[in-house]
Image (cartoon, grey):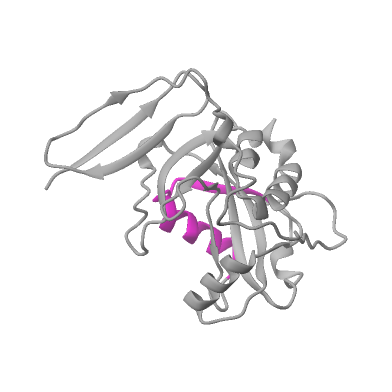
Amino acid sequence: MGLCRFAFFSSSPLILFSSCSSFLGPRTVSISFPNYPLPSANFAHLPFLPKTHFVITKTNIPRAATASSSSSSSSMEAPPQGYRRNVGICLINYSKKIFAASRLDIPSAWQMPQGGIDEGEDPRNAAIRELREETGVNSAEIIAEAPYWLTYDFPPAVREKLNNQWGSDWKGQAQKWFLVKFTGKDEEINLLGDGTEKAEFGEWSWMSADQIVDLAVDFKKPVYKEVLAVFAPHLQ
């Protein structure tokens, strides 16, 4: 069975890409979405994500820390107890647009790449690894780092599901965020990743900061707003 790629191009700023396998050969389909964004783009009341309290934890460190700093704040502070150590990746292209993808298990939920930090792993190395595993991207460089850990609490249903999956009892995730510049071409992006992990995403797009926040699930919105505020000087 041969592989094929297809893309959805619209007249709006949002361009969706996906991939599949088929024996029918390569296809390209053009679809126009004149009324984007749809009213349903706001997921504030999704039934599977009950309202919950949001927690953002940060230390009293200057607002910006670049990759050229003499020391890494990742190694200078520890995340709060009870939260799973995690990295987040804000991947931008030459046009300062931000990469986001829709989850396979929750197609209406869009997010930036993220993933757990292995035991003893440096957060910077974890960020590059997670980016490669989730998007197939190797052509990238870290250009900035959030100078503090950000946390969010899992909604009860999500907490139960994930802790059953992980065999743990985390309250949420403590994230170290990195701003990463994509130096390759879009053809390099592959939502099957590098083949080492199960695929998580179904579609992807380059978005504005406002679109990233609007399309994020409720319990991640506060962290996304904070991250994008920290990285704002690099996004202008």
x and y percent of residue 93 in the render? Answer: 53, 35
- Visible residue check, residue 72: no
Q: Is residue 96 left or right of residue 222?
A: left
Identify the residue at image location x=61%, y=35%: 211
Q: Position of residue 231 (x, y in %)?
A: 71, 43
| 175 left or right of 17 in image | right
Residue 168 drawn above or below residue 196: below
Q: Quadrant of residue 30?
A: top left
Span of residues in magenta: 122-145
Left or right of 143 on screen, residue 232: right
* Location of the C terminus (image quadrant): top right
Q: Which is more toward the observer, 135 or 94?
A: 135
Q: Which residue is nearer to you in this view: 236 or 115?
A: 115
Q: Nearer the viewer, residue 58 or 7?
A: 7
Q: How many marks?
A: 0
Image coordinates for residue 168, horizontal then vertical, percent = 56, 81
